[in-house]
Amino acid sequence: MKKITIIFLSVSCLIILVSSIAFSMNNRDVSDFFFRFGLIERELKESISRNDAVPFIETSDFSISEVETNTIEEQFKLTGVDNGRKHAIDLLLRREILYCEALKQGFSVDHKELTDVINANKEIMRAALNYESDILQYFSGLGMAEEEYWESRYDVFKKEMTISKLTSAQRESIREMLYIEALSNGFTASHEEIEDLINFNIEGIRSSPIAGIFMRDLTSLGMTLEEYWEAQYDDLKHEIAISKHLAAQGISLSDSPQYESISNKNAFLVQEAIESRLESYIQELIDDYIEANDLLWVFNKS
C-alpha cells in the first residue's frame, strides 16, 4: 500500500530557522526580517546573472560559488547564528555530497514528482506561516513574484528531493536493522498493542492542523483514514518492538520541551534513534568525500 510522504522543501536554505527566530519578534520586526533575508539572496541571483559567481569549492562532481557561500553566511548572521561562514560551508557541502551519493545509488526525481511536492509545500507554507505579512515580504526582498520564486528554485528543490529519497531509503534500512535487533533480544508487539496505537494515531490526525491536507491526499488514493493506518500495521509493529528494545537499553527521548505534551512518545523515541544512526551515516559519507577530494583546506577559511 502506498504511503503518504510530504517532503518539506526549504522556502530558502534557512526558512525554518528564520521562522523560529521571527516568532519572538513583533510584527513589524518580523516583516522587516523576512524582507532583509530575501534581499540578501537577491545578490546571489544578480551575481549569477552577471556570470561572476566565482567558484569557491570545485571538484569533479560539483562547484560551489563564493557568492553563494557568502549569501548563506550572511543569512546565518542575520538569524544570529555564530560562525555563519562555517555553517554555510557545512550546509552547501552536505547538500552537494549527498546529492552526488544519491545519484550514484540511482535515485532520481521526475518532473511530475517535483511539481506535486512543490504544490503541496505551497499549501503548507500558506497554512503554517503568516503568509501575507511575512512571506510576501520575503518575496519582495528577493524582487520576485511567488511563482517566479518557485520556478527559480527548481534545480535546488530537485536536489533536495533526490537527497530525500536517499535518506528515506537509509531510514528504512536503519529501521529494519533496529527491528532485527529488537527481535533478537526478545522484544515483540502484540496485536492489541498495535490496534491501540492505530486508534491513537487516527485521533491524532483528526485533531492535527494539517488534517485537511492529509485527508485530501488520502481521498486521492481512494483510502479512508482507518485504511491508511491499517496499511501501516507492520511499521507500527516494528515501532513498538524497537521502542521496547531501546527502553530496555536505558535509551530515552532527549530532554527537549517539544516532547513534554506528547502522549505517545514511542514514535519519537524510535525516530530519534533512526536519525542518530542516519546522521552517523551521512557524516561518514561527508568525511570520506572531503578526505578523498582534499577539501580540508576549506574549513581553514571558515
Image (cartoon, grey):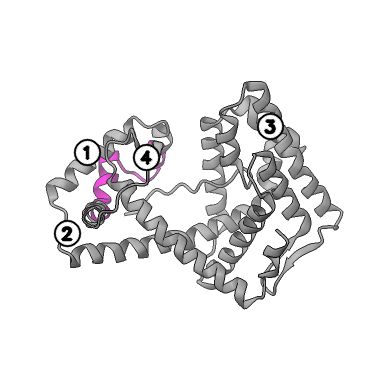
- Quickly name the residue at label 2: 187
Point out the tag, 2 or 1, that comes first from the N-terminus: 2
The answer to whether the residue labelled 1 contacts the one labelled 4, judged by CB atoms less than 8 Å apart, is: no
Residue 219 image label: 4
Q: Position of residue 55 (x, y in %)?
A: 78, 64
Q: Position of residue 115 (x, y in %)?
A: 57, 49
The answer to whether the residue labelled 3 contacts the one labelled 2, judged by CB atoms less than 8 Å apart, is: no
Which amino acid does the dot numbered 1 rest on? Asn
Seen at 65% across and 76% down, the residue is 293
**Distance between mark 3 and mark 1 Cα atoms:** 42 Å
Q: Quadrant of residue 62?
A: bottom right
Q: Is residue 105 above or below residue 193?
A: below
Foreground label between 2 and 4: 2
**Please, what secondary structure does the residue beneath circle 3 have?**
helix
- Residue nearer the viewer, 211 or 220: 211
**Distance between mark 1 and mark 4 Cα atoms:** 19 Å
Q: Position of residue 80 (x, y in %)?
A: 65, 39
Residue 199 image label: 1
Q: Is residue 35 above or below residue 292?
A: above
> In this rendering, would 60 be left or right of 254?
right
Point out the tag, 3 or 1, that comes first from the N-terminus: 3
Q: Position of residue 154 (x, y in %)?
A: 65, 52
Q: Residues within 10 Å of mark 4 (few under 14, many from 20)?
A: few
> Which quarter of the figure is the C terminus placed in?
bottom right
Q: Residues within 10 Å of mark 1 (few under 14, many from 20)?
A: few
**Distance between mark 4 and mark 3 Cα atoms:** 39 Å
> Which quarter of the figure is the N terminus placed in?
bottom left
Which amino acid does the dot numbered 2 rest on? Phe
Magenta segment: 215-235
**Distance between mark 2 and mark 1 Cα atoms:** 22 Å
Which amino acid does the dot numbered 3 rest on? Phe
